Image (cartoon, grey):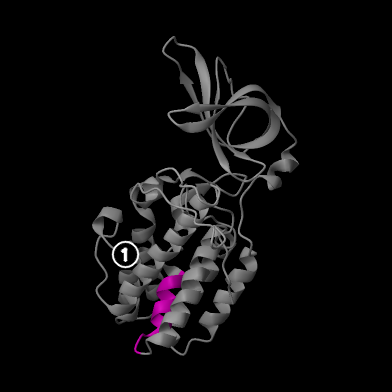
Amino acid sequence: MASFAMIKELSEKKDKNGNGYLDMTVIGSDKKEYPAKIWRFDNNGQYETGQVIEIEYTLDSYKGKNQLTITSIKKAPDEMIKDFVPQSEYDGKAVFSMLLDKVNSFKDGELKQIVTRIMLDNREKLEVYPAAYRLHHAIVGGLMLHTASIVEMAEKVCTVYPNINRELLLSGAILHDVAKTFEMATSKTGLCSGYTVGGELIGHLVKGAMNIEETAKELGIQGEKAILLEHMVLSHHGVPEYGSPVRPMFLEAEILSALDTLDATIFEINNATSKVEAGDFTERQWALDNRKLYNHGLSSAEYKVNLG
């Protein structure tokens, strides 16, 4: 079979006989990811992540999973890259503007100043960044999509529970992942290609809290508001096992953590079930407690969001 694909991941390895081969993950024209191998191949820097390639291959099974064995490979035109990069259905610039409009309507002047400053300082990256390396919303514009989805859910929760401080919850939702622009490195595809040194050593939770503290000082804002926002960012992963140094300790922090988990889980389930036919189970999903998932076919497995 012949097709075009984009290299997402590439490693040069040796088999038990010392022969070089390429171990790859490629994105097909259907925007789905596939493991692939090129046996007895000396790369010599010819191919790298982010390249579009024209391939001939056979479809094999390895340990119960489909795998492409590539028998012929050559470079494809660079301009084809846009056909292979998964991206948000919403324009990141439009989503950013929508969120900024919400913040501009805040009555709480301190929250408004802090959130606006941090958003504008990171605008260029926020509008295009993915939300993750491998897992939920790992698509171009995924960070804004994930953030806006949580904000939309937060708005609905506030209509059910009017005792929630809406502006505090929305502020935490908008800022909770901003420091992923510090944590992750991106390639020319716009997707995450790995983690920065700062991302590995500090991470987006701690850096996000640091940004809030520094911004509040620059704005001359004293008191508890900044500390509340810092806590929301630090605690939004919920438990130490997932990276939070502290668990949520007030209502808005708890809601943010729950909504973050919910949105990520919805994306992961839709992404997994969209790859199998109705009536079939997925392979085990390690990011979802190693569960198999069932596509019941009663609703679309495609990930869709209504914003605004």
Res. 131 visible in picture: no
Answer with the quarter of the image where residue 42 lies: top right
Locate residue 58, reporting x and y percent: 62, 25
Where is residue 49? Give x, y as percent: 58, 36
Q: Main secondary structure of the magenta part?
A: helix
Residue 55 x, y percent position in the rendering:
68, 28
> Would you name the residue on which mark 1 appears?
234
Say which of 226 and 273 sits in front: 273
Q: Which residues are magenta?
A: 163-174
Q: In terms of depth relative to the viewer, which is nearer, 207 or 293?
A: 293
Q: Name the residue rendered at 25%, 66% in the picture.
A: 247
The extreme front residue here reads 279
Is residue 171 shown to the viewer in this render?
yes
Determine the secondary structure under disc 1: helix
Q: Residue at x 34, y 52 (%)?
A: 202
Estimate how packed mark 1 is, as few (under 14), some (14 to 19) or many (20 or more) residues with alpha carbons within 10 Å.
many
Rendered location of residue 227, percent (x, y): 30, 75
Please identify the residue farthest to the top as the structure is shown: 17
What amino acid is at disc 1?
A: Leu
Please tell me which residue is depicted at 43% across the width and 28% down the height of the picture. Answer: 63
Residue 303 is left or right of residue 286, and the answer is right
Image quadrant containing the N terminus? top right
